[in-house]
Image (spheres, helix red, strand yellow):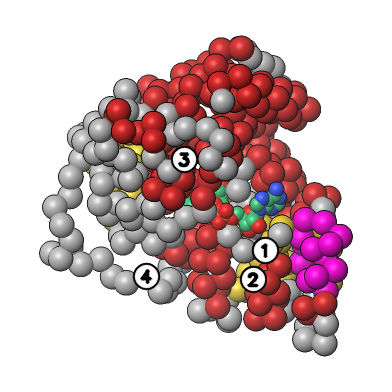
């Protein structure tokens, strides 16, 4: 029996996780859930899974959740960032799904590492911000890390069982998002609704915009660097619009191993939940004969400048990826609020990176300082251009 905390239970990944969990009541027990401000959905989840703890953003949300649960389930409701760290490190929990979006996920995910948990990592931003620190905590506390991001889960499945011997390259596939064929001149005017209409995946709004700019793939290159201890030169990005091949590993003998499946996050979630076993996920079987042609192309860095910025940030190292991540979060939020154009997202990130080169990131305090400085700077830049 695995005992779970699901951080970000009310989001796209959280909901898919609970869908898989509900199929296997004999294997998984939910001990704690977090939901920030989506209280109605979190209340339904608490009633369905009867967790011991639920964590929300603030006292107002806590009061609302308590009222919705009264007389139905004995879940203890807590609130705030410390409570997230607490449910990530409970002694009775062995597995933590880290599915909070953005930098807010870093502290609780680190708490799970320090608690020696099996971490199912969806929150790629924590590795982008603090990869070196994070991997050290995982090793020091004998935690384990299983990737949920579909590309990294695919790479994990295609890697040798032990070590990296014979591996030449990691090939991360990318759908290219909704604007793969949009004339570049038209990109300045695309709306948040168009950017969030991903052709293959249903996701939260932030990662949907990241997919449209391909910053998502850039963050994933940095994530792959840390997860698989692989330098930027050995990580390539391939556009594959059908999202059937989820990523590949190339070996020195010329073999390329790919993991395939329908684009449904329940596959990597079920894989990581049950690893090293396999369980039903509810995902329909892949019908290759019915699938359209599988196409692969090189990404166009003029169309997707964010991908280039992320590769550069990885090469620069130190606090630069944290600056990249924070500037991106601020720019994407401004775009979603119609305060910034789509093409300007990359401009804001580039200008922020330029004004904050080589930030230190040896300690968590330094990482958060780089993150905070980048947010201030990005907001100033947005203020100046809008
Ligand atoms: P989402 O927006 O649907 O859900 C985010 C979750 O985080 C919600 O439960 C929300 O309540 C919670 N949350 C938001 N802000 C918070 C804060 N400040 N403090 C605490 N909790 C907060 O996002 P998602 O699409 O489920 O993505 C979650 C993570 O998984 C992201 O890091 C994303 O990059 C990654 N991921 C998602 C997908 C996908 O298919 N959705 C695929 C790969 C990786
Ligand atoms: Mg991904």
> Which residue is located at x 67 percent, y 46 percent?
105
Picture coordinates of residue 247 (x, y %)?
Answer: 33, 45
Q: Position of residue 310 (x, y in %)?
A: 47, 26
Whether the residue under disc 2 has CB within 8 Å of ligand 1: no
How many angstroms separate mark 1 from mark 3 (CA)?
Answer: 22 Å
Q: Which mark is residue 41?
A: 2
CB atoms of marks 1 and 2 within 8 Å? yes
Q: Is residue 101 visible?
A: yes
SS under mark 3: helix
| Farthest residue, direction front | 386
Q: Is mark 1 within 8 Å of ligand 1?
A: yes
Marks 4 and 3 sit apart, C-alpha to C-alpha, by: 25 Å
Please state which of residues 45 and 67 is positioned toward the viewer in this rendering.
Answer: 67
Compute the Cα span from label 3 to label 2.
Answer: 25 Å
Front label number (4 vs 3): 3
Of residues 108 and 231, which is closer to you in this image?
A: 108
Spatial distance from mark 1 to mark 2, Cα to Cα?
Answer: 6 Å
Label 2: few (<14), some (14–19) or many (≥20) C-alpha neighbours in 10 Å: some
Would residue 149 be visible to someone looking at this image?
A: no
Q: Residue at x 32, y 53 (%)?
A: 199
* Tag of residue 210: 3
Q: Is residue 201 left or right of residue 18?
A: left
**Marks 4, 1: nearer the viewer:** 1
User: Is residue 11 part of the magenta span, yes or no?
Assistant: no
Name the residue tied to disc 1.
38
Instruction: Give the label on residue 283, or none.
Output: 4
Whether disc 3's CB lies below 8 Å from ligand 1 is answered yes
Circle 1: element type: loop
Q: CA distance from mark 4 to mark 1?
A: 26 Å
């Amino acid at each position: 029996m695995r005992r779970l905390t699901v951080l970000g239970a009310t989001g796209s990944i959280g909901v898919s996780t609970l869908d898989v969990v509900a199929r296997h009541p004999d294997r998984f027990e939910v001990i704690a859930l977090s939901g920030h401000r989506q209280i109605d959905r979190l209340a339904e989840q608490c009633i369905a899974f009867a967790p011991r703890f639920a964590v929300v953003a603030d006292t107002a949300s806590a009061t609302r959740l308590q009222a919705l649960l009264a007389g139905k389930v004995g879940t203890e409701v807590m609130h705030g960032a410390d409570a997230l760290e607490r449910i990530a490190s409970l002694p009775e929990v062995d597995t933590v799904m880290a599915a909070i979006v953005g930098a807010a996920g870093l502290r609780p995910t680190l708490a799970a590492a320090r608690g020696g948990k099996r971490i199912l990592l969806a929150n790629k931003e924590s590795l982008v911000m603090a990869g070196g620190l994070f991997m050290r905590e995982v090793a020091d506390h004998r935690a384990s890390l299983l990737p949920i991001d579909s590309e990294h889960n695919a790479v994990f499945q295609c890697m040798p069982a032990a070590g990296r011997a014979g591996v030449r390259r990691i090939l991360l596939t990318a759908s290219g998002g909704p604007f793969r064929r949009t004339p570049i001149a038209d990109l300045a005017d695309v709306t948040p609704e168009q950017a969030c209409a991903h052709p293959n995946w249903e996701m939260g709004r932030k990662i949907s915009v990241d997919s449209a700019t391909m910053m998502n793939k850039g963050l994933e290159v940095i994530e792959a660097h840390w997860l698989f201890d692989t330098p930027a030169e050995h990580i390539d990005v391939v556009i594959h619009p059908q999202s059937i091949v989820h990523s590949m590993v190339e070996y020195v003998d010329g073999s390329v191993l790919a993991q395939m499946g329908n684009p449904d996050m329940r596959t990597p979630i079920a894989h990581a939940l049950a690893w090293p076993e396999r369980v039903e996920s509810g995902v329909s079987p892949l019908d290759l004969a019915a699938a359209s042609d599988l196409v692969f192309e090189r990404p166009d860095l003029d169309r997707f400048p964010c991908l280039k910025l992320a590769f550069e940030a990885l090469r620069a190292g130190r606090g630069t990826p944290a600056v990249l991540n924070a500037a991106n979060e601020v720019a994407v939020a401004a775009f979603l609020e119609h305060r910034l154009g789509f093409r300007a997202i990359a401009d804001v990130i580039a200008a922020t990176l330029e004004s904050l080169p080589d930030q230190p990131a040896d300690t968590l305090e330094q990482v958060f300082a780089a993150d905070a400085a980048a947010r201030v700077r990005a907001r100033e830049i947005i203020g100046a251009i809008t």
